[in-house]
Image: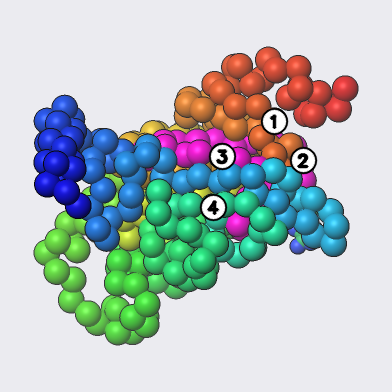
Amino acid sequence: MSPDLLEQGQERLAEQQGKHGGDRSPGYARPHRAGELDLTHGRILYLEDVHVAFDGFKAINGLSLDIAPGELRCIIGPNGAGKTTMMDIITGKTRPDRGEVFFGGTIDLLRHSEAEIASMGLCRKFQKPTVFEALSVFENLELALQGPRGVAAALWHRLSGAQRDRLAEVLELIQLQAEAQRPAGLLSHGQKQWLEIGMLLIQEPKLLLLDEPVAGMTDQETERTAELFLQLKGRHSLIVVEHDMGFIARLGGTVTVLCEGRVLAQGPLSQVQADERVIEVYLGR
Ligand SMILES: Nc1ncnc2c1ncn2[C@@H]1O[C@H](COP(=O)(O)OP(=O)(O)OP(=O)(O)O)[C@@H](O)[C@H]1O
């Protein structure tokens, strides 16, 4: 690199840091450092013209999507629109026939296995809660904190001070402090969902994919979940696939409508709900 270019680069870097307040700048404004997720282009995830066919049936048909760092994006769409298949592609479960899927600006997810993608901080929560029912809430979180160590080894391992602090922080966030010593099997459906979300949060995910998180919850539990997600927004990036419009309205933000494997409409909920094309696919007019 010529000295001139080096100088210009350093000036641009200093300018960017100054403009956005150094380390307190939003992730996307920060110059990319080696080993970090590259958010310099303002996208934590992007899909470009993705296609998947199952026995000739086009389940995903030219899907393009961008998610910003810290965004809470809701995805809706009629049955069979391709929502689950989209999440399968992002998490490496299904390989598309063509298209691009990038995590940050530099990680080509199509080159990685499902396990590698999960270890990069791209986590998925399925619709049904899966917690260790015989273990307490605390023990479930403790296990999640320690990763794939094996249940017995993890439970005997002493937590560090920082790990205890993180565990307490997550317990408070999911509002299960009073239940910490209860076996998870005795929790309500909503509480089990929050515990599982807590088990993901404790691993500091960068992007969380949540499949119908409030299905089967009471109104009160749904409201509490909305509060939780709004608290997570900004610190984590979230993609929420849901059918519950009241819940989506409560979350605010951008809603993406999928239909026949591609984006049909996108914008605030009120806008997409007023869109004739969206009304047509939902009501079949
Ligand atoms: N492995 C597969 N083999 C064949 N067809 C599949 C497969 N997976 C999905 N499909 C089809 O692809 C289409 C999209 O399915 P997908 O489950 O992604 O939709 P969805 O939007 O999640 O629907 P729902 O809201 O009902 O869960 C559907 O017509 C489905 O039958």
Of labels 2 and 3, the one closer to you: 3
Q: Is residue 166 above or below residue 256?
A: below
Labelled pair 1, 3 in contact (Cβ < 8 Å): no
Q: Which residue is mark 1?
A: 264
Q: Which residue is mark 4?
A: 101
Q: Locate residue 184: give its quadrant.
A: bottom left
Judging depth in this view, the residue of 187 and 143 nearest the camera is 143
- With 50 as the anchor, is 259 left or right in this view? right
CB at disc 2 and ligand 1 closer than 8 Å: no
Q: Residue at x 76, y 22 (%)?
A: 277
- Distance Cα–Cα, label 2 vs label 3: 15 Å
- Residue 24, image x and y in percent? 16, 37
Q: Earlier in the sequence, mark 2 or mark 3?
A: 3
Magenta range = 63-89
> Is residue 276 in the magenta section?
no
Q: Residue at x 37, y 39 (%)?
A: 41
Q: Which residue is mark 2?
A: 260
| Element on which disc 1 rests | strand
- With 14 as the anchor, is 230 left or right in this view? right
Q: Earlier in the sequence, mark 4 or mark 2?
A: 4
| Element on which disc 4 rests | strand
Q: Earlier in the sequence, mark 1 or mark 4?
A: 4
- Residue 194, image x and y in percent? 43, 50
> Is residue 80 in the magenta section?
yes
